[in-house]
Image: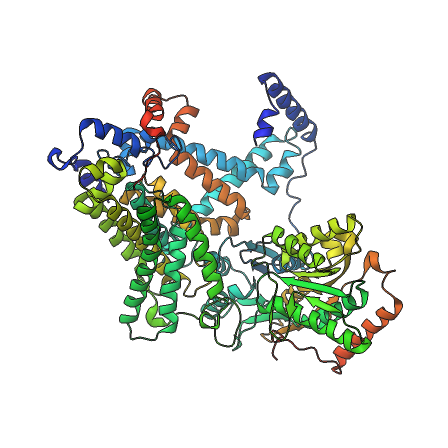
Amino acid sequence: MKTSLRAIPKRGSLATVAALGATALLLTSCGAPPEAGGTSSEGASDYTGCIVSDSGGFDDQSFNQSSYEGLKKAETDLGIKVNQAESTADTDFGPNLRAMVTAGCDMTITVGFLLGDATEEQATANPDSHFAIVDFNYETPIANVKPIIYDTAQAAFMAGYLAAGTTKTGTVATFGGIKIPTVTIFMDGYADGVKYYNEQNNKQVKLLGWNKDAQDGSFTGDFEKQDVGKQLTQNFLDQGADIVMPVAGPVGKGAGAALQEAKDSGKDVKLIWVDSDGFLNAPEYADVMLSSVMKSMGETVEEVVKEDKDGNFSNTPYVGTLENNGVALAPFHNFDSEVSADMKSQLEQIKKDIISGTLVVSSEASPKS
Amino acid sequence: MSEDKGKHVAEPAPEPADQPLSAEQARAAKADLETAGGAKEPSLVPAAAQGGITAERDSSPFRNFFAGSAMTSVLAVLLALIAGGLLIASTDKQVASSAAYLFGRPTDFLAAVWNAATQSYVALFQGAVFNPRAATVAGQFAPIMETLTIATPLITAGLGVALAFRAGLFNIGAQGQIIFAGIFAGWVGFALHLPMGLHLLLVLVAGIIGGAIWGGLVGLLKARTGAHEVILTIMFNYIALYFLRFLLTTPAFQRPGASNPISPVLDPSAIYPQIFGSQYRLHLGFILAIAATVLVWWLLNRSTLGFEFRAVGANPKAAQTAGINVSRATILVMAMAGGLAGMAGVAQVAGTEKVLTEGVAASFGFDAITVALLGRSSPWGTFAAGILFGAFRAGAVQMQVQTGTPIDIVLVVQSLIVLFIAAPPLVRAIFGLNPRRKKMATAATSPKAALPGGAA
């Protein structure tokens, strides 16, 4: 702010800036007006899909954003109307949800366990409206709420196996944002994957940052402070780890920054992203992006909205697994040539085994069905 | 409320016999008041314009608005609406697309700007006061009920901040006090199972005690050691927040069988009853907030203790000389401020949220500072400012849902409105009518104002 003020030292230059601005306006403002009355979108449905975020907002690089993008995709693909409300604090949940129902939403998507109570309250009060809640399941099902949950441990297992098989130092690491089931399920699967690799190959790859038996490990404390994620990652690097999987939404960028710096100084380090394909969603760290543990929340949200629009709503929980591609290990992109064909086929086998049930991946946080 | 206005205007200045300060001390005290005993930046809001903080000009903002500077207030709102409207328009898609052919058909552009701005304000009004589009009469009045609901914690927490201001303490610890009260009240609410009535009473008492402990500790440390209350309250906010975070990871504060950091729902017997039935969220806490406002007004203007608080706030050294126990006043006023903020914590856990989560206090503790400043630190001013803030909060939801204005822009617009309302001199300066400039200058350069002050 201060510098921008200093950059305009005199009235004369202010006038220059104004003149430039006016010219720019003039240049961009000479387009032809559109024909009157030609803007109505044909075939638009009167179905309204709505979404309420938790306090992370729709730009959280995590489940809010993915779900939101899924709904926006439904807007273009299915021609539905979309209403959105971003919560800035926990106290906004109730009012935002009520506003959605009042605004005539056919289906309202809510995101995260914090919205569980508010969604239940509105769903019970408005039995004719439909709801879907991402990453949360009710102990007793509610007739008009569809939970959307993921058995993320399955894909994280593959990531753990991949990390253990790729590490050069024999040490891999992970950390979380806050110790909640939707975070620890990644870490459980990752830990099991590393363990499985050790058993199968008689190796001693060490895992830092999570102890599955004690259910305890490293956490940044929130999903905001990227510098803490960076610090934690540097600690892991100092302890000899060379592959890190941050399970902390945008805090993962801190890990990415630390790894990128280490890479620039000549170290061979790699990052495993979570939630979406980090190669596409965090391209600034593409150089260290080994793979990602993906939860296809966007696709699921679009699918659930489509089902409801076609009149096929059900309150049976959607459980994303490797089998239905709800969770998956992302492609290796830049590292494709570095991952051996042998490793690729082993991962393929693991995927098959998990789907067929011969290999059981369990986590305390796994969806109970 | 107009009745009260009358009372305020008629309220006599303290009798000279009760007033142990000499004329010289009183003048110095006034200068100190304007900087909250030197703890505040001297020219944050020119104190001459804040009026209400001084004892002899203790009055509601209504008087300030309508007696002295009605025109300024109208201009302030107008300015805020225009600035906010332009901002809303600048983010509107329709405006952007019609700007591309501004010279082809300028009416389109102007119409788009007008529509974007007015629709947003209509949505704000419909979300905060009255919604004629609702299907039922009950639904039409729902927005004003929502406004009062959100205002409830803001009023009580704001009163806590204002009370401490009047004693010369810059209390920014309302956030921590709300959280600590929430922990106490929440735990009593979900862990104990008591009969109707008794349970709620205990929740309320626990919350007030929790807040009072957290505020009182600050007062105690300040009185005994002289540590600055700003540092203390900031740190106490952090301690409370991280303590709550820790508690929520322990099974005692989690739901049985789950490990999410969210407490069990409070027992029905521990929840504030809803005043107008289940269709509105407005709860008993609002009545208690009105009662608290009356109590604080009485305390400050009619009681000996309140007089001591104000004297300490005016000039702690003079108050000490006059035989007032400054330490005692500091501890007491902070405990009371904490207790009031504690009521806000209870309004959260027992009123609207019904559970304890990390975000249970939202940002009410910090908004309370603005509310208290906007209300000129007077009880009814704080009450009115709390309702104004509540209206903005409630209206923001509709503004976002109905018009698609991004929430961040909504918040920027609201902050602009508050800024213009809170700083009449700014508005006067913009419109080139600033009759009080000379007086303000003397106040700002008063030598006393620069001296470090504060109790102890």
Residue at 59% in and 52% down? A225
Front residue (pair B355, A265): A265
**Residue B153 falls in which quadrant of the image?**
bottom left
Observer able to see residue A46: yes
Residue at 24% in and 43% down? B326
**Residue A268 falls in which quadrant of the image?**
bottom right
Observer able to see residue B3: no
Front residue (pair B374, A22): B374
Residue A248, horizontal then vertical, whole percent: 63, 59
Residue B24, horizontal then vertical, whole percent: 21, 26
Indicate left or right for B72 with A203 as reference.
left
Residue B147, horizontal then vertical, whole percent: 38, 52
**Residue A273 falls in which quadrant of the image?**
bottom right
Q: Residue furthest front?
A: B225
> Across the whole image, how many numbered discs are drawn on residues?
0
Colour scheme used in the picture? rainbow
Indicate left or right for A83 with A268 as reference.
left
Indicate left or right for B100 with B342 as reference.
right
- On screen, residue B421 above or below A340: above
Which quadrant is home to the N terminus of chain B?
A: top left
Residue A351, horizontal then vertical, whole percent: 78, 74
Q: Residue furthest left?
A: B17
- On screen, residue B167 above or below A85: above
Q: Residue furthest top?
A: A12
Indicate left or right for A7 with B1 as reference.
right
Which quadrant is home to the C terminus of chain B?
A: top left
Front residue (pair A268, A16): A268
